[in-house]
Image (cartoon, rainbow, N blue to C red):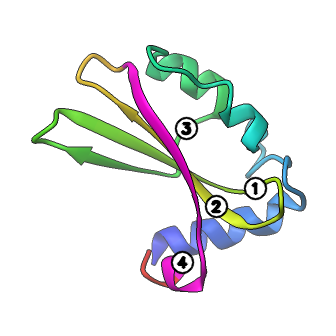
Amino acid sequence: MRDVAAFLAAALLAGCAAGPYAGGPPRSDAVFGRISAGMTQAQIEQLIGPPDDTMRFPLSHTIAWDYLYQDTWGYTAEFSVTFDASGRVVSKLSKRLDRRDLLTR
């Protein structure tokens, strides 16, 4: 429930697709497009700020950082960047969310 409250607060502050969340760096498809394999966690945090949520994957020795935002078309979406054990980007993805996704957070 904490994540849903945080998302709702962020969505109210966002105002537009490229607007900052809670005073942080802008979150947009264009900014997320600048992220590439091999970047460090420090570089990602400098570019888009601290994650809204994290999830560890012990079997693969990776961690995902998740960011909620409004995509270019105004849909609520989640961007996820995955780091390997050395803290470097190995993958990224973005998905649109619907109410069911938000209620399960």
Q: For the residues marked 3 and 1, what is the alpha-carbon distance in whole angstroms?
A: 18 Å
Which residue occupies 34% across, 20% down? Answer: 87
Whether 87 is drawn above or below 13: the answer is above
**Amino acid under label 4?**
Leu
| Number of residues whose C-alpha sits closer than 10 Å to that of mark 3, classed few (under 14), some (14–19) or many (20 or more) | some
Q: For the residues marked 4 and 3, what is the alpha-carbon distance in whole angstroms?
A: 20 Å
**Residue located beneath label 4 in the image:** 102
**Amino acid under label 1?**
Asp
Quadrant containing the N terminus is: bottom left
The region drawn magenta spans 88-102
Quick one: 25 or 102, which is closer to the camera?
A: 102
The mark nearer the N terminus, 4 or 1, is: 1
| Number of residues whose C-alpha sits closer than 10 Å to that of mark 1, classed few (under 14), some (14–19) or many (20 or more) | many
**Closer to the eye: label 4 or 3:** 4
Could you tell me which secondary element the residue under label 2 belongs to? Answer: strand
The image quadrant of residue 8 is bottom right
Residue 103 x %, y %: 50, 84
Q: For the residues marked 2 and 3, what is the alpha-carbon distance in whole angstroms?
A: 17 Å
Could you tell me which secondary element the residue under label 1 belongs to? Answer: loop
Q: Is residue 13 left or right of residue 43?
A: right
Residue 6 is one of the magenta-drawn residues: no
**Residue located beneath label 1 in the image:** 71
**Residue located beneath label 3 in the image:** 50
Quick one: 73 or 105, which is closer to the camera?
A: 73
The mark nearer the N terminus, 4 or 3, is: 3
Q: For the residues marked 2 and 4, what is the alpha-carbon distance in whole angstroms?
A: 10 Å
